[in-house]
Image: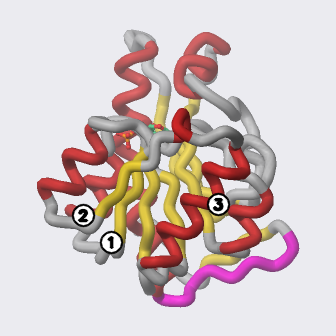
């Protein structure tokens, strides 16, 4: 399996994939100089920067993104903190082969600042979700989730870090399961043949 990782931020989820020794064919970022780019470079991974602001439209940006990923024969795209919505054209180029990690227990708290949304709401259990990407915002079929408690002395930042630690466990486990052909999508239900996290 050829894995392409797209990121926009610090890149700690990319780092988790690298640390789990999951082969990464290419890393693409849309924010020049972001942490994910530095991590890709430090790990000696092929990489590219495509600044979305340089493109006249979302469709143009996505077309360029597809072309770059196809150059590396990518057959699974992981969005690891990639802060752009993807067009149906992009998704059509990788059908059921784009997955995202989201820092909340979907369908609760989609969109940005999900951990803060959950904290402000006052939930007692928070967590993260890895899901297939569809044209909506964090609406695609769920593959796996991990939960963490919200403690009385938490603030939004301590909760964010606890959720992030689970993302770092869950995402590599899902990618490995995908690579081993253990994930099957039936309708909008993803079946995983063995437990993803022991
Ligand atoms: C993660 O919390 C991810 O779930 C969200 O953005 C954050 C990215 O963190 N979409 P990093 O760039 O992987 O450190």
Residue contact at pointers 1 and 2, CB within 8 angstroms: yes
In the image, which residues are magenta?
A: 180-187
Which residue is denoted by mark 1 in the rendering? Answer: 24
Crowd band around label 1 with a 10 angstrom C-alpha radius: few (<14), some (14–19), many (20+): some
Q: Position of residue 185 (x, y in %)?
A: 75, 78
- Who's the residue at 83% across and 67% down the image? 188
Q: Quadrant of residue 57?
A: top right
* Residue in the foreground of this view, choosing between 51 and 111: 51
* Residue in the foreground of this view, choosing between 5 and 28: 28
Q: Position of residue 50 (x, y in %)?
A: 45, 48
Q: Is residue 16 left or right of residue 69?
A: left
Q: Residue 18: give its label.
A: 2
Q: Position of residue 194 (x, y in %)?
A: 53, 81
* Residue in the foreground of this view, choosing between 61 and 46: 61
* Residue in the foreground of this view, choosing between 1 and 120: 1
- Who's the residue at 31% across and 61% down the image? 47
Instruction: In the rendered view, tell whether residue 154 sits above or below residue 141.
Output: above
Q: Which quadrant, please, contains the C terminus?
A: bottom left
Which residue is denoted by mark 3 in the rendering? Answer: 63
Instruction: Estimate the spatial distance between the alpha carbons at disc 3 and disc 2, rounded to whole Å.
Output: 27 Å
């Amino acid at each position: 399996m050829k894995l392409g990782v797209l990121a926009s931020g610090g890149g700690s989820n990319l780092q988790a994939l690298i640390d789990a020794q999951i082969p990464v064919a290419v890393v693409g970022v849309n924010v020049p100089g972001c942490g994910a780019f530095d991590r890709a470079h430090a790990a000696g991974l092929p990489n590219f920067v495509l600044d979305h602001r340089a493109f006249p439209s979302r469709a143009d940006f996505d077309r360029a993104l597809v072309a770059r990923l196809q150059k590396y024969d990518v057959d699974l795209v992981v969005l690891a903190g990639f802060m752009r919505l993807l067009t149906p054209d992009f998704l059509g180029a990788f059908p059921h082969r784009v997955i995202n990690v989201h820092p909340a227990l979907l369908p609760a708290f989609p969109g940005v600042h999900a951990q803060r949304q959950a904290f402000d709401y006052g939930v007692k259990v928070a967590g993260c979700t890895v899901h297939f990407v569809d044209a909506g915002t964090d609406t695609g079929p769920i593959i796996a989730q991990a939960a963490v408690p919200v403690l009385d002395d938490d603030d939004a930042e301590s909760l964010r870090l606890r959720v992030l630690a689970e993302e770092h466990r869950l995402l590599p486990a899902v990618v490995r399961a995908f690579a081993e052909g253990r994930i099957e999508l039936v309708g909008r239900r993803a079946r995983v043949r063995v437990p993803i996290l022991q």
